């Protein structure tokens, strides 16, 4: 199977919110391919982050796709608001969804790309019934809820297994650093969500190039 080009999706969860627009713009200028928005509700995960207003605020400052990761209960209630705010990709967690096919149909009607995410301990078999209906699978490499966690290497075989039969985008999110990015890519991931390793660096462009293995 031909290797896919590695794309970098900076997670604004690690950005400086006092100058968020500039952070997003600078990440794009430095070579980012997408902007990742981690949405948490304090229910599905033990943290609260941001909602549609943040997506709406950053939409005018970048032409990059806004990759919205819904780590929330009842995602069906928020598809419309996030799409209206400017989301280009909407990803929901299989663990939160009572009617995955209904939710997929709802997202498809908006014309946006869609993804489904699995926590580290959720088996890939949970996706069997819908895998042919999604554009992307997001494999969590930390337990969702907080930024700055360490990458879980024991998830790498899961990514490799998924890549053996899934030809579309595989995104990984959680603890991705310059040191482990190529391990995730070698396992089959082609979209790397990266927070601290970009936004805590002084040189976004160099950090993104290193993450891509360039």
Image (cartoon, rainbow, N blue to C red):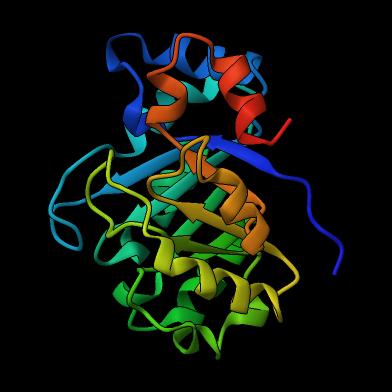
**Furthest residue to the right?**
2
Residue 63, by quadrant, is top right
Q: Vertical placement of 213 versus 99: above or below? A: above
**Residue visible at 19% across and 51% down in the picture:** 41
**Residue visible at 36% across and 79% down in the picture:** 122
Q: Vertical placement of 105 versus 198: above or below? A: below
Q: How many circles with numbers are drawn on the protein?
A: 0
Left or right: 32, with 16 as reference point: right
Q: Vertical placement of 214 versus 205: above or below? A: below
Locate residue 102, reporting x and y percent: 47, 79
Locate residue 6, reporting x and y percent: 71, 44
**Residue visible at 23% across and 39% down in the picture:** 49
Q: Is residue 21 visible?
A: yes
Locate residue 167, reporting x and y percent: 75, 71
Front one among 4 and 12: 4
Left or right: 20, with 116 as reference point: left
Residue 126, by quadrant, is bottom left
Q: Is residue 61 visible?
A: no
Quadrant in the picture for the N terminus? bottom right
**Furthest residue to the front?**
179
Front one among 50 and 166: 166
Front one among 37 and 79: 37
Residue 85, by quadrant, is top left
Locate residue 196, reporting x and y percent: 37, 29
Q: Vertical placement of 122 versus 181: above or below? A: below
**Residue visible at 65% across and 14% down in the picture:** 29
Front one among 168 and 160: 160
Quadrant in the picture for the C terminus? top right
């Amino acid at each position: 199977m031909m290797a896919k080009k590695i794309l970098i999706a900076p997670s604004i969860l690690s950005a400086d919110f006092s100058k968020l627009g500039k952070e997003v713009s600078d990440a794009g200028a430095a070579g980012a391919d997408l902007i990742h928005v981690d949405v948490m509700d304090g229910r599905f995960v033990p943290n609260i982050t941001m909602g549609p207003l943040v997506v709406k605020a950053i939409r005018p400052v970048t032409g990059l796709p806004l990759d919205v990761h819904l780590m929330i209960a009842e995602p069906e209630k928020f598809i419309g608001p996030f799409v209206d705010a400017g989301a280009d990709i909407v990803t929901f967690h299989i663990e939160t969804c009572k009617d995955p096919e209904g939710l997929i149909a709802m997202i498809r009607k908006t014309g946006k790309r869609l993804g489904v995410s699995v926590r580290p301990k959720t088996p890939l078999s949970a996706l069997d019934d819908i895998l042919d209906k999604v554009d992307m699978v997001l494999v969590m490499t930390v337990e969702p809820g907080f930024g700055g966690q360490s990458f879980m290497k024991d998830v790498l075989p899961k990514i490799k297994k998924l890549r053996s039969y899934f030809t579309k985008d595989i995104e990984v999110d959680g603890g991705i650093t310059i040191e482990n990015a190529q391990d995730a890519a070698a396992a089959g991931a082609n979209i790397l969500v990266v927070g601290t390793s970009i936004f805590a660096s002084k040189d976004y462009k160099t950090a993104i190039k290193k993450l891509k293995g360039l």
